[in-house]
Image (cartoon, helix red, strand yellow):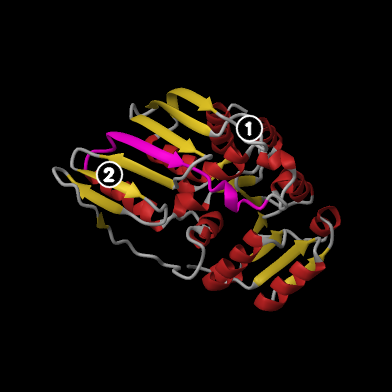
Amino acid sequence: MMNIKNKSIAIIGSGFMANHYSLALTKIGIHDVEIVGRSKKSVGLISKKYNFKAIHQDYINGIKLLSEKDLVIVTTPIQDIILATKLAMKYGQKNILIEKPGSLYSNELLKLNKIKKSQKIFVGYNRLFYPNLQKLFQLVKKEGGINSCNFTFTEWVDRIDFKKYPKSVYSRWGIANSLHVISMAFRLIGMPKKITCLRSGKLSWHKTGSVFVGCGISKHNIPFSYNADWSSSGRWGIEVTTKKNAYRLIPLEKLYKCSKNSTSWSSVTFSRKYPNVKEGISEQILAMLTTKNSSNLVSLNEAAKFNQVAEKIFGY
């Protein structure tokens, strides 16, 4: 890929996702990277591990110090993403990838979309770049399209670290976390044209519900249904049917097929170009730096629509 190794990158934030982006950049062959973060320890660890330049500063002063980059990746905690993105825009950055979901509120994403000018800003839904999802797109297209879809997004609430984020994040956990599944389902079938959302129960930290069931029809006239019970057992997963086969993304990183008039599921093979990197991250970076697979990127407007659907599903 022409000159890709000469690109200059800045990562804002030094936490979990910053580490994954750092590894992905290294595997792609990009080493001109600066890390901006408030934690001296975290910034130091990443910069030392990957031989990146460290800027140990708060976001306001740190982003100000950056020269214009080919790409700025915002990986701050959810509550800081919008501010960090606005600062990057203010100080001349024009190609910006912000970590999903971008914001807990659809209106914040829409406002950000209105004030951007020449900047390219996309939201990092790396799962939409999953190799198995891309394989599924190819398969269902050959089989005449998707007939129906069902998905589930049960959260393992006993494993949630409630010390990591402010209470406001957990109160909108459907957007903070479950949108991983919901975004994949609706990218497959199209956004809802009609949707009926039912909720029951509640959790001490999630007052709007603990059981979520619904159905509808997408803009491509594909019927869909969903269910999740955060007070019980279950997992994330998506199933779609065509006239020939049924397909499962359960777990989301795998792909299985059940042929018509059969009850057995077989694994579908697909290639991984970056097998030792968090899936979809490398492909997403390349899409931001080139024109390859750029249609898989999520605009601020589409991200806002994902949030709006989640607001309906979860009653926010």
The image shows residue 48 at horizontal and vertical percentages of 71, 77
Work out whether residue 288 or residue 219 is closer to the camera in this orientation and state it: 219
Q: Residue at x 48, y 59 (%)?
A: 283
The image shows residue 27 at horizontal and vertical percentages of 53, 72
Work out whether residue 122 or residue 186 is closer to the camera in this orientation and state it: 186
- Residue that numbered label 1 is attached to: 106
Q: Residue at x 32, y 48 (%)?
A: 248
Q: Tell me which segment is drawn in magenta.
A: 143-161
Q: Quadrant of residue 119?
A: top right
Whether residue 146 is in magenta: the answer is yes
**First in sequence: mark 2 vs mark 1:** 1
Would residue 1 be found to the left or right of residue 225 on screen? right
The image shows residue 125 at horizontal and vertical percentages of 53, 49
- Residue that numbered label 2 is attached to: 140
Q: Residue at x 47, y 37 (%)?
A: 228
Q: Amino acid at mark 1?
A: Ser
Q: CA distance from mark 2 to mark 1?
A: 31 Å
Pick out the residue farthest to the left. 261
Would residue 66 be found to the left or right of residue 314 on screen? right
The image shows residue 206 at horizontal and vertical percentages of 64, 35
Mark 1, other Cα within 10 Å: few <14 / some 14–19 / many ≥20: many
Whether residue 296 is in magenta: the answer is no
Q: Amino acid at mark 2?
A: Val
Mark 2, other Cα within 10 Å: few <14 / some 14–19 / many ≥20: many
Number of numbered labels in the structure image: 2
Q: Residue at x 60, y 63 (%)?
A: 21
